[in-house]
Amino acid sequence: QVQLVESGGGLVQAGGSLRLSCKASGITFSLNNGGWYRQAPGKQRELVATLSRTGFTNYADSVRGRFTISRDNGENTVYLQMNSLKPDDTAVYYCNAQKVPSNFEFWGQGTQVTVSS
């Protein structure tokens, strides 16, 4: 059974940094696609960053240059390094795994990130 467990969220001051972790079981990130999404109150869930099984990355314009998605194959974990955080980054962040080639998606439980001004 697929399970994605997120950690690393918390409260941080504007300009600070956090690193989110998503450890997977039942699915191998190196053989599939991974990513991070976020949802702020009253808004739809939006893409933050994706990482394909081949290592290709994609970022939302709002986070490009500040956030970095990466993967540790030995730990089967996807990370999101978030630097220069802004209050607008405040949201629940969700880990995502997409099966190749079916494109079936799995989601973590979410971790809260709050950035104070």
Image (cartoon, grey):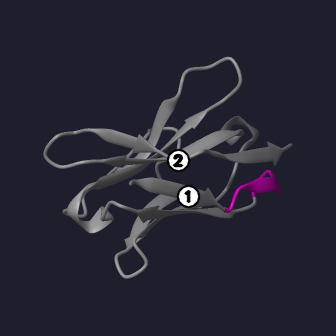
Give the quarter of the image for residue 86.
top right
Above or below, 91 against 35 in this view is above
At 76% from the left and 40% from the top, the residue drawn is 87
Which residue is the extreme one toward the left?
A: 101
Picture residue at 19% right of the left edge, 63% below the top: 54
The kind of secondary structure element at disc 2 is: loop
Q: Nearer the N terminus, badge 1 or badge 2? A: 1
Q: Is residue 23 left or right of residue 76?
A: right
In magenta, the rendered stretch is 8-15
Residue 41 colored in magenta in the image: no
Residue 92 visible (yes or no):
yes
| Residue 83, horizontal then vertical, whole percent | 63, 60
Residue 96, position in %: x, y?
42, 46
Q: Quick one: which residue is furthest to the front in this view?
A: 1
Q: Residue at x 39, y 69 (%)?
A: 71
Q: Position of residue 9 (x, y in %)?
A: 71, 56
Please report the residue visible at 72 percent of the width from the left and 39 percent of the height from the top: 90
Q: Is residue 73 left or right of residue 96?
A: left
Q: Are marks 1 and 2 in contact (CB under 8 Å)?
A: yes
Q: Residue furthest bottom?
A: 74
- Residue pointed to by mark 1: 5
Which quarter of the image is occupied by the C terminus?
Answer: top right
Q: Amino acid at mark 2?
A: Gly
Question: Farthest residue in the top direction?
Answer: 42
Q: Residues within 10 Å of mark 1 (few under 14, many from 20)?
A: some
Quadrant that contains the N terminus? bottom left
* Frontmost residue, 70 versus 100: 100
> Residue 108: which disc?
2
Q: Position of residue 74 (x, y in %)?
A: 37, 82
Q: Please, what is the three-letter code of the amino acid marked with disc 1?
A: Val
